Image: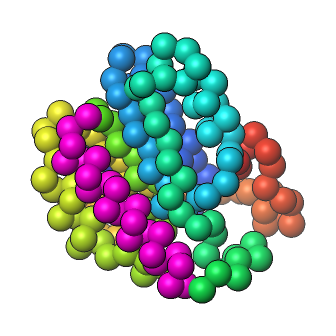
Amino acid sequence: MIIVFTGNGKGKTTAALGQAVRALGRGRKVLIIQFIKNFESGEHLFFKKIQALSFGTKIKIIPAGKGFVKILGDKLPLSEHKKAAQNALKLAKKEILGGKWELIILDEINVAVGLKLIKAFDILKVITFHKSALVVILTGRGAPKSFIKKADLVTEMKEIKHPFKKGASAQIGVEF
């Protein structure tokens, strides 16, 4: 199954993490590869605590990006972001074909495509050859039409109101 969480509203990664918790509760193995993020967020702290319990071998989260691209003070050359996204895609391919995981979340992959760090076609090639029992979740605003067409389930988060519009900063425990 391929699932896409997209849209301009908050909740795409949060929905994917909810799916991860549900899968873990059923004893499934979950891998999360983050294509943009490179910092320790609430989900990293949570999964570190979970790893100390019996779930340790069933969940892995990898922040494979170089951070937000051209926003929030990013000064890295685009080439560094592209290299990180390409490496994350290679890792995703290896893990998808490896058969170890039952749920793989490719977090912010839609954004990586939108920023032209990687190509949608290359991702589709990878996720098309996964084993039938594997669930792959693609998150991030601006999902390419090709992802939406290929997906079995698509949910669009729609922003109605957000404190960012009034100049509020991201809040620990809410946005990260």
> Which residue lies at the image location 40% right of the left edge and 46% below the top edge?
105
At 40% across and 61% down in the image, what residue appears?
88
Instruction: Give the answer, above or below, for where 120 lies relative to 135.
Output: below
- Colour scheme of the rendered structure: rainbow
Q: Is residue 17 left or right of residue 70?
A: left
Horizontal side, residue 149 vs residue 78: left or right: left
Q: Is residue 26 above or below residue 91?
A: above
Q: Is residue 85 magenta?
A: yes
- Residue 150 percent across, percent down from the top left: 20, 59
Name the one closer to the observer, 85 or 2.
85
Residue 123: in magenta span: no
Residue 113 percent location from the top left of the image: 40, 73
Residue 98 picture quarter? top left
Residues in magenta, as a range: 78-100
Labels in figure, total: 0
Q: Is residue 32 visible?
A: yes
**Frontmost residue, 84 versus 136:** 84
| Residue 7 shows in the view | no
The quarter in which the N terminus is drawn is: top left
Question: Which residue is drawn at the image coordinates 26% and 34% (left, top)?
Answer: 100
Q: Main secondary structure of the magenta part?
A: helix
**Vertical position of residue 87 compared to residue 135: above or below:** below
